[in-house]
Image (cartoon, rainbow, N blue to C red):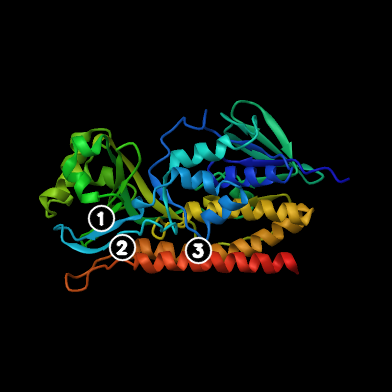
Amino acid sequence: MTPSPRIAIVGAGPAGLTCARVLQRHGIRPTVFDADSAVDARDPGGTLDLHADTGQIALEDADLLDAFLGLASISRQAKTWMDEQGRVLAGFVPDESDQAAPEIDRGRLRVMLYEHLLPGTVHWGRELTAITPGGDGVWRLEFADGSGVEADLVIGADGAWSRVRPLLTDAAPEHLGVCFLDARYDDVDRAHPEIAALVGDGHLFVNDGNGRGLILQRNGDAVIRGYLAFRARLDWPARQGVDVRDRASVSAYLLREFGHWSADLRRAITEIDGSYVPRSFAGLPAPLTWDRVPGVTLIGDAAHLMGPFGGYGANLAMLDGAELARAIVAAGDTEEAITRYETEMFARSGPLAVASNNATREFFADHTPDAPHLPPDAAEEHRTYEARAAEYRRRRAASNLS
């Protein structure tokens, strides 16, 4: 019997953990390495929706769909779109039975995936510093703590700034022209009732038609999180004389930038809890492909980092992980499996990455009052997710019968 390959997954985010879970369900035991000291060692960010045709398919493969639905929220799929004066442009309220894209806090999703792995699968506190060929198709991984391992297959699930990606391509994330400040509001229904009312049960999107936007999300535990976003270069704080460590300095800048917005929306921009955290939107060149390199591949943001509009990032990441695991199980030969996986992943992710990056730029483009940026039809999007999920299952069933 051919021994199972030694599989090292670099990164314990949704992609890496999903891949590990599906592999374990088929008797293959990978090892996952992550720089974090524990599953809950850092702020994981806000909420995300898992689509019926991608993230939920992956959870089915992981036998975790019911566990997810037990944690997820149907009502948080609701969406409201406004202009900068608080005028409602569109809205969407999901039906109680709508499971096309339920919302879940990122931290809860990560913990759920982690807790369904075999003990000892994830090695925390392992920051990858180098990866080199060791001969005979083996890769040598070295970590900041001085430890090292060898692997027959390395799966880069290590996100935007992947250390595995350079083995396959010189492509690097590019700034999409938009920066934002990560913000949160705690105990929101009691401490920030006006903001809670604006956001409602789900999401609020505001666009002023001149490169500024506000995106807020209802999370669990009475928290709202979001982005205060604007077109800018990465060095905007220095260019604007803003000290991002000084809340008053940041708040003064925001009041200048968003001063023409309504009083209620300005309140949401300045009355946050904690500090503003500066970030930016970035994407890999799209569509991105590479030539095969034996014994190494990428999943998730490491393979196709894209803008946030469309919500494809985590969904594609989890589907990548599940599809790669299934390919490894079905093929029995890792090179055949990787070739099959990458071919299908390129075809799946390329068009979505192009569309997502374009949608990000379009949201923050200039628009005239008589031709505002209008949102997509959320109800139609949900019908599309369901239809694609049904088609995906039909193709898979036909493939298994052939």
Location of mark 3 (residue): 286
Q: Given the image, on which type of amino acid does mark 1 rest?
A: Gly
For the C terminus, give its image quadrant.
bottom right
Residue 357 in the image: state x and y as whole percent.
42, 62
- Label 2 CA crowd tier, 10 Å (few <14, some 14–19, many 20+): many
Location of mark 1 (residue): 213
Q: CA distance from mark 1 to mark 2?
A: 8 Å
Tag 3 secondary structure: loop
Residue 348 in the image: state x and y as whole percent.
56, 64
- Please state if 94 lies on the left or on the right of 142 as rendered: left
Q: CA distance from mark 2 to mark 3?
A: 18 Å
Q: Given the image, on which type of amino acid does mark 3 rest?
A: Ala
Residue 305 versus residue 400: which sits nearer the camera? 400
Looking at the image, tell me whether mark 2 or mark 3 is earlier in sequence order: 3
Q: Is residue 191 above or below residue 325?
A: above
Picture residue at 72% right of the left edge, 52% below the top: 328
**Image quadrant of residue 170?**
bottom right
Residue farthest bottom in this picture: 370
Asked if residue 299 shows in the view, the reply is no
Pointers 1 and 2 in contact (C-beta within 8 Å): yes
Residue 335 versus residue 94: which sits nearer the camera? 94
Tag 1 secondary structure: strand
**Image quadrant of residue 225?**
top left
Tag 2 secondary structure: helix
Which label was assigned to residue 47?
none
Location of mark 2 (residue): 363
Q: Given the image, on which type of amino acid does mark 2 rest?
A: Phe
